[in-house]
């Protein structure tokens, strides 16, 4: 059967080079000499929401990936919010009250220790024998701080340091107000007696967000570990309109607010002496949407609840971005990770020789050579400003090239047979964003006056592993019988959100 030879189509866009996608289990070796870590915790978004269907908010989906690495298979460990935050610093699995975001601030009871370092029972505040990452850090003489945006804005709700609710009382921070958008359930440090019971300890380490700017000015004033929680608007939790202002001073919420928050604070972190010396910045989400209960990495159900994701085994796929002098800009990893992996990775980075809770489960993989893919380190610079209409442009003149190979027939009868079996289109994307932009294909018939009508479409738009894959166009019997002789056009489209960034057409004649 005649073949249409390789069709190379140039799609004009600009971006930095995307490195090869890592998919296999990473090589395990000692992590690089990272001594300063920041975690910025965002809320309630799936990977597709944050990194695929998010064209309007380019800082997250375009700018940050070009400065670091996208962990495309990063997962939350539960639903709703609080159980994920607790997991990240302690390795404790969800229990029914942490899954409900602890509307009443009560102790975990009975709280006795079971297997795998898990506290038995249900409740909010874990007993003193449950240790956390920050307990481990202090034992090694390392420093830490939690920066909580809006905490203490309304002293009638919560204090300006620590920010814990009153024991045995309803949590007054469950919903934002116009004056105060702090949420205690997004502050993991107030759920452990090991932190709360030492007089003054929590207040000395957990405070408001503005001091972060001064702390970043020198290596000496920068904590080894910094946890950053935006308010309920800026973390993407609340939709438009937010109860109070976002970073821009408007009430726009969701990823619009999260993007503005990142655009303000990430350059300050990446420009700090500590980051340039030996830093690692992680931008994570606590969980995906409630309907996404996917899990990874052998996540167990835990001893206290049958389903960490309430309706399923996990917190869904969220994705994350990692930035460091030891991470090659523009790289991508498809190695599965979750919050337990993150805890184990941080313990390794700081030279801690024990893993807490389920961070210690057999087979759990911490960040490896797929993440720390520039072991010798290198200069870190934020990409330049984005121009309107650019697909994540940073001013680097590099084009995205798409090559499509497919077989077609030159007669109507053979074309009908081809579409019945499935017209296989091999697509390869090289250059920038090859593993980030979804691709779709369709077949159209050219009509008079340059118009065209779609006769068949491929599968739903999807990202291509390492920028290459096969998309199949099929047409049912009724549609096949409507095929006529004429000029047909294979259309390859590169997307972000539901908009077509660039479109390529290849015409061929059927008689």
Image (cartoon, grey):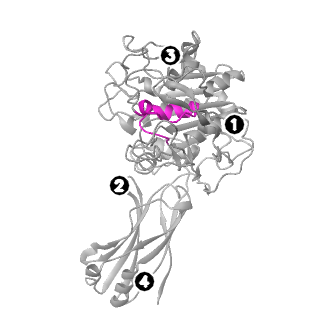
Mark closer to the observer (4, 3): 3
Give SS at disc 2. loop
Q: Earlier in the sequence, mark 3 or mark 1?
A: 3
**Disc 2 + disc 3, Cβ < 8 Å:** no
Mark closer to the observer (2, 3): 3
In this rendering, the count of numbered labels is 4
* Label annotation for residue 162: 3
Separation of disc 3 and disc 1 at Cα?
Answer: 27 Å
Q: Residue at (63%, 36%) from the top-left corner? A: 280
What is the magenta range?
76-99
Separation of disc 2 and disc 4 at Cα?
Answer: 28 Å
Estimate how packed mark 4 is, as few (under 14), some (14 to 19) or many (20 or more) residues with alpha carbons within 10 Å.
many
Residue at mark 1: 348
Residue at mark 2: 498
**Residue 381 in sight from this viewpoint:** no
Q: Residue at (66%, 28%) from the top-left corner? A: 274
Separation of disc 4 and disc 1 at Cα?
Answer: 54 Å
Residue at mark 4: 408
**Disc 2 + disc 1, Cβ < 8 Å:** no
Query: Residue 77 in magenta?
Result: yes
Q: Earlier in the sequence, mark 4 or mark 1?
A: 1
Residue 313 percent coordinates (x, y)? 46, 46
Residue 204 sits in quarter: top right
Mark closer to the observer (4, 1): 1
* Label annotation for residue 158: none
């Amino acid at each position: 059967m005649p073949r249409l030879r390789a069709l190379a189509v140039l799609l004009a866009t600009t971006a930095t080079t995307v490195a090869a996608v890592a998919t296999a289990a990473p090589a395990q070796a000692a992590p690089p000499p990272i001594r300063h870590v920041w975690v910025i915790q965002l809320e309630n978004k799936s990977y597709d929401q944050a990194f695929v269907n998010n064209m309007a908010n380019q800082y997250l989906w375009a700018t940050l990936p070009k400065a670091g690495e996208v962990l495309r298979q990063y997962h939350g460990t539960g639903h709703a919010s609080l159980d994920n935050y607790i997991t990240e610093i302690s390795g404790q699995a969800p229990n029914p009250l942490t899954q409900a975001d602890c509307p009443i601030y009560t102790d975990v009871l009975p709280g006795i220790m079971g297997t795998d370092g898990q506290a038995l029972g249900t409740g909010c505040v874990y007993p003193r024998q449950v240790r956390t990452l920050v307990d481990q850090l202090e034992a090694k003489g390392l420093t830490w701080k939690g920066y909580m945006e809006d905490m203490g804005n309304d002293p009638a709700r919560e204090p300006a340091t620590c920010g814990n609710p009153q024991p045995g009382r309803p949590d007054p921070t469950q919903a934002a107000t116009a004056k105060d958008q702090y949420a205690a359930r997004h502050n993991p440090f107030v759920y452990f007696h090991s932190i709360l019971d030492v007089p003054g300890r929590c207040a000395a380490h957990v405070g408001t967000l503005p001091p972060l700017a001064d702390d970043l000015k020198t290596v000496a004033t920068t904590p080894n570990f910094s946890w950053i929680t935006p308010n309920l608007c800026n973390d993407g939790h609340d939709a438009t309109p937010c109860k109070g202002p976002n970073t821009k001073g408007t009430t726009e919420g969701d990823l619009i607010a999260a993007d503005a928050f990142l655009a303000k604070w990430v350059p300050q972190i990446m420009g700090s002496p500590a980051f340039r010396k030996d830093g690692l910045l992680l931008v994570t989400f606590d969980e995906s949407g409630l309907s996404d209960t996917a899990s990874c990495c052998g996540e167990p159900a835990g001893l206290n609840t049958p389903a960490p994701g309430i309706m399923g085994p996990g917190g869904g796929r969220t994705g994350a971005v990692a930035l460091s002098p030891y991470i090659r800009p523009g790289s991508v990893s498809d190695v599965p990770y979750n919050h337990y992996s993150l805890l184990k990775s941080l313990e390794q980075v700081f030279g801690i020789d024990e893993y807490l809770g389920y961070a210690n489960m057999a087979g759990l993989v911490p960040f490896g050579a797929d993440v720390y893919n520039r072991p010798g380190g290198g200069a870190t610079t934020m990409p330049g400003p984005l121009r309107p209409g650019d697909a994540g442009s940073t001013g680097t003149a590099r084009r995205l090239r798409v090559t499509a190979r497919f077989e077609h027939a030159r007669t109507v009868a053979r074309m009908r047979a081809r579409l019945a079996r499935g017209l296989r289109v091999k697509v390869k994307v090289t250059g920038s964003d090859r593993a980030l932009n979804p691709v779709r294909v369709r077949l159209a018939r050219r009509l008079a006056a340059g118009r065209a009508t779609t006769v068949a479409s491929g599968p739903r738009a999807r990202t291509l592993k390492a920028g290459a894959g096969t998309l199949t166009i099929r047409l049912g019997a009724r549609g096949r019988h409507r095929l006529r002789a004429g000029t047909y056009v294979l259309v390859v489209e590169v997307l972000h959100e539901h908009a077509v960034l660039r479109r390529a057409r290849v015409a061929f004649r059927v008689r």
